[in-house]
Amino acid sequence: MFGFLNIDKALGVTSHDVVARIRRELKLRKAGHAGTLDPLATGVLVICLGPATRLSEYVMHSTKRYVAQVHFGRVTTTDDSEGEVIAEHATDKLTRADVEAALAAFTGDILQKPPVFSAIKQGGRKLYEMARAGIAVDVPARQVRIDSILFQDWQPPVAVLDVTCSSGTYIRSLARDLGEALDVGAYLAGLRRVMSGSFHIDDAATLDAILADSEWTRHLVSPQHALANWRRIDLDASLATTIAHGGAIPAEIGADNELALTFAPSDELLAVVRREQALWVPQKVFWRD
């Protein structure tokens, strides 16, 4: 089995739960996800099957889009609705115009501190493990990119925002920081991922629907679609053999480090290659002649 599943993850389910159920009920040895979703989030969860797990790092680092519900006036320990409320502020004077004016400071390349309750590791331990143990942690800020924030709705004190951003962006942190900027505090009350790279919510299916389908393989998404913005290179038999055996092949002049997908004459995915000094060098080989 070689491909991806576009799952519309349900509320309250962990990404690990989804993977475990797929392995168990579809009797697959190799499956993983390409970018986790918190239990309180719903929407696009990309599942990699078989050799596609070797492509997860590329899918994982693609652009994401979310619809977020930001609740102003409260601060929680986890920056979402699961945590304990540790501060409350009046929001009766907060307007939609105030929120919209504050959004500009959060677009582009910004420095963002991940939530203390997150799976990021520090000193070999996950931050949420240290937080639960009562260990004070200074979480360093890191650079992320937020391409756009569109204001969808305003039902005081909750704003609904459409956020397009880089991989690694925490929408919980965005909600927290937006609340701080407006001096009223805020937490993430709801989150739905509607896009992860080439995977869109309109094409997703629930886990229950896929597992109940006797022809579930029709839901498989090919690597070509998963990495649709990558260059495709079709090779003849001789060049395909070279790549299959780990050799490099000539590349036209272009930017170093570009990644591409190469295909054998049979139209099978052959390898991921990287351009290095006028050569295509194999990074991950899937096909053998």
Image: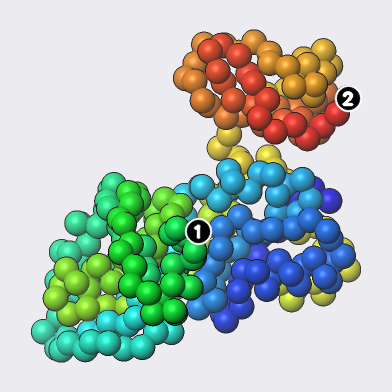
Residue in view at x 39 percent, y 79 percent: 134
Which residue is at a point 51% across and 25% down the rendered structure image? 257
Quadrant into which the C terminus falls: top right
Residue 121 showing in the rendered view: yes
Residue 144: give x, y in percent of width and height. Answer: 35, 50
In terms of secondary structure, where does tag 2 sit? Answer: loop
**Foreground of the two, 174 or 136:** 136
User: Circle 1 sits on which residue?
Assistant: 124
**Figure quadrant of residue 203:** bottom right
Picture layout, residue 54 above or below residue 284: below
Q: Residue 28 lies in what quarter of the image?
A: bottom right
> Which amino acid, mark 2?
Asp
| Visible residue check, residue 147 | no
| Residue placed under numbered mark 2 in the picture | 289
Q: Is residue 146 left or right of residue 45?
A: left
Question: Closer to the observer: label 2 or label 1?
Answer: 1
Residue under the point 64% across and 26% down: 273
Where residue 135 sits in the image (x, y, percent)?
A: 37, 74
> Can you say whether 100 is above or below 238 in the image?
below
Task: Pinpoint residue 87: horizontal percent, then vertical percent.
Answer: 23, 87
The one nearer the camera, 189 or 35, is: 35
Question: Mark 1 is on which residue type?
Answer: Gly
C-alpha separation, residue under disc 2 versus residue under disc 1: 41 Å
Give the class, few, some or many, for how many residues have Cα within 10 Å of label 2's Cα (few <14, many ≥20). Answer: few
Name which of mark 2 and mark 1 comes first in the sequence: 1
Q: Residue at x 44, y 79 (%)?
A: 133
The x, y position of residue 278, in whole percent, is 56, 11
Mark 1 closeness class: few <14, some 14–19, many ≥20 residues within 10 Å:
few
Please state if 263 lies on the left or on the right of 186 as rendered.
right
As helix, strand or loop, the secondary structure at mark 1 comes to loop
Disc sitting over residue 16 in the figure: none
